[in-house]
Amino acid sequence: MEAVKSAKFTASIILGFNPKDFSVKGRMKMLTEGDAGQTRGMLPLGQELGITRPLIDVAATPPGSGSGAMYRSIFAVKSILGEPVGGGYHNITSAWPWLKKFKKQPGKESAYMPSDVGTNLLAIAYGCNYCLYGPIEHAVEVFPAAAMSDIIVADGARDLGTEIEAGDHPLLKLT
């Protein structure tokens, strides 16, 4: 903790993983109050260490282990905490025990990528601000799909009065 404080970081990813409770409430509790042996919330702890620009990571977990609540947490973090939110959604796919076995079967090797791409597209549809992605070798499949999702979400928000101001948004660069 002292090393982080002395480095004088102002921005950092703050992880909302709660090993005791994978629900939206559990993730929010870990971020705000602490839980599962952690006596302070991750956000207040970050603030104590000088983090004034947190990037909340909602802690991707595999199907059956809170992945649905993780996606719903995107909306909760933005609505309740007002902070940018994202995560390493590709971890859902890589940690899914069933898919690990399934893709090893002859003729099933290609099952991985649609699932991997889909994890990021769902997060974008839920309103995330960023997607952490890896391995980089799969970026050619993931990045265009993620850009398309960003374009569709932004385009869909136009009739709500939302306008894209960032000049580097995919809606402005790739349409």
Image (cartoon, rainbow, N blue to C red):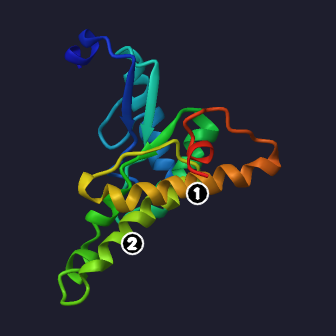
* Residue drawn at the location 74% of the way across and 39% of the way down: 163
- Residue 38, by quadrant, is top left
Quarter holding the N terminus is top left
* Residue drawn at the location 58% of the way across and 45% of the way down: 76
- Front residue of this view, candidates 147 and 2: 147
Q: Residues within 10 Å of mark 2 (few under 14, many from 20)?
A: few
Mark 2: secondary structure: helix
Left or right, residue 75 beside residue 158: left
- Kindly report which numbered mark, 1 or 2, lies closer to the viewer in this rendering: 2
Residue 99 versus residue 52 in the image, above or below:
below
Residue type indicated by callout 1: Ala
* Residue drawn at the location 62% of the way across and 47% of the way down: 171
* Residue drawn at the location 64% of the way across and 40% of the way down: 79
Left or right, residue 134 beside residue 149: left
Q: Position of residue 5 (x, y in %)?
A: 28, 13
Residue type indicated by callout 2: Pro
Q: Residues within 10 Å of mark 1 (few under 14, many from 20)?
A: some
Q: Position of residue 93 (x, y in %)?
A: 32, 66
- Front residue of this view, candidates 120 and 33: 120
Mark 1 and 2 residues: CB-CB less than 8 Å, in contact? no
Q: Position of residue 85 (x, y in %)?
A: 49, 40
Report which residue position mark 1 lands on: 125
Residue 10 versus residue 42 in the image, above or below:
above
Q: Is residue 152 visible?
A: yes
Report which residue position mark 2 lands on: 114
User: What is the distance, in whole Å, between disc 1 and disc 2 at their CAs?
Assistant: 16 Å
Mark 1: secondary structure: helix
